Amino acid sequence: MIKLFLTGDNHFGRRYERYPDVKDLIIEGRFESFGKAVDSANAFGADFLVVAGDLFDRITGISRELSSRVVELLAGFEGTVLVLPGNHDYYSGDEQVWKYFDEECARAGADILLLKEYKPYEFDIREEKIVFYPAFCRSKHGEENNLGWIKELRLSKSTAYRVGIAHGAIEGITPDMQKKYFLMTQEELEDIEMDAWLIGHTHVIYPSALEEKGLSELGRIFNAGTHEQMDLGTGTPGFCIALEIEKERKNSKIRAKKVRTGAIRFEDIKLDIRSSGDEGALERAFKEAEPQLTKNSVARVTITGAIGADEYDNRRDIYDKYAQKCLSCEIVDDELSELITREMIAREFAETSFAAKLLEELIDEPREAQMVYDLINRGGKVEA
């Protein structure tokens, strides 16, 4: 039996300039979660820790210090680490990021191997042979995937363990409408005689049905997503995948589970408030969203609808109250307005006035009613 631990799309070096007040905490969190991933790989007893591309966020501007820190974490793994260049940290032979990486690996004396050649990489583990077939990226974009050299080998079933490692989009799983991210199909991968495929690029876990509690058989194509949620567009808590492959003659059984490693969550929260004039609607909406507003959350709260006048006037106090619960909280309330009621219209405008009639017509359109109301109070062209 061979045990593998899969991660990828770690994107060390991402700057997080959108969050200037907490960017250092977010960056540090990614390192801490990666250390947790390495510890989990050791606890699983993995023979290999596989990074399926995009260990780094880019090929330029990655300092030696950052590279050294990543290597130091990887060196904590008790087996062999295999690193595949992805489309963000591609390898064509002259990238500074990989020069630093190789130098730091040599300095650390770590068992870390950069898969930078299209060739089989063979290892002997407990009197068994395992062969890895890397399909790494040589550019950031590509209309064709990098499986061609493996297909040309015309592999047949073997008693050796065979594992393919590739970086790129998978049709039906990864959005790639322009087909510029080394698109692969599941059928294409299945047709190649591999015991398992370890894939990077898609920032969500696949198969999605993987469980945390125990190993299960769910095919032989796996994508770990990312060890820590990256941004608002990535809806994963941060996972890696632990796999074991058992070979009986030329047939293999693959069992896997997902391992939660992430801590910081990016929460995109939408509050659509349709108040009937009762006070407290905004407070209640935030209360319902409170489980997502934690000390480890970077939240964007988008609020739409209309609320009563008193709560609208005091909305900033409510925002501050709940924003304090988060690591960072951005409030977007451009589409939130004060609820215009018939009582308000009757109180402020003559019943037969054009303003009253117009606001009555817009009573079920709170956004438009608020715009007209504001225009009137600013002395606009609508006459009361």
Image (cartoon, grey):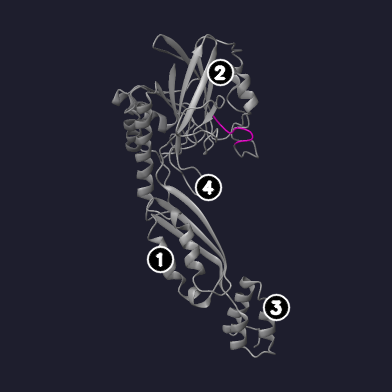
The foreground one among 199 and 324 is 324
Mark 3 secondary-structure assignment: helix
> What residue did someone put label 1 on?
320
| Quadrant in which the N terminus appears | top left
- In front: label 3 or label 4: 3
Whole-angstrom CA distance, mark 4 to mark 1, is: 25 Å
Looking at the rendered image, the disc whose residue lies closer to the viewer, 4 or 1, is 1
Task: Give the residue type at disc 1.
Answer: Asp
Kindly state the secondary structure of the residue where label 4 is placed. loop
Rendered location of residue 289, percent (x, y): 48, 57
For the record, the magenta segment spans: 167-173
- Residue 72: x percent and y percent? 31, 31
Marks 1 and 3, how far apart at CA: 35 Å
Q: Evaluate whether residue 172 shows in this view.
A: yes
Instruction: Pick whichever of labels 2 and 4 is earlier in the sequence.
Output: 2
Q: Earlier in the sequence, mark 3 or mark 4?
A: 4
Of residues 367 and 293, the one drawn nearer to the viewer in this rendering: 293
- Picture quadrant where residue 373 is located: bottom right
Q: Are marks 2 and 3 in contact (CB under 8 Å)?
A: no
Q: Amino acid at mark 2?
A: Met
As drawn, the label of residue 233 is 4
Q: Residue at x 60, y 75 (%)?
A: 370
Front-most of 221 and 44? Answer: 44
Q: Alpha carbon of mark 3 to alpha carbon of mark 4: how far? A: 39 Å
Q: Using the image, tell me which numbered label, if any, was put on residue 361.
A: 3
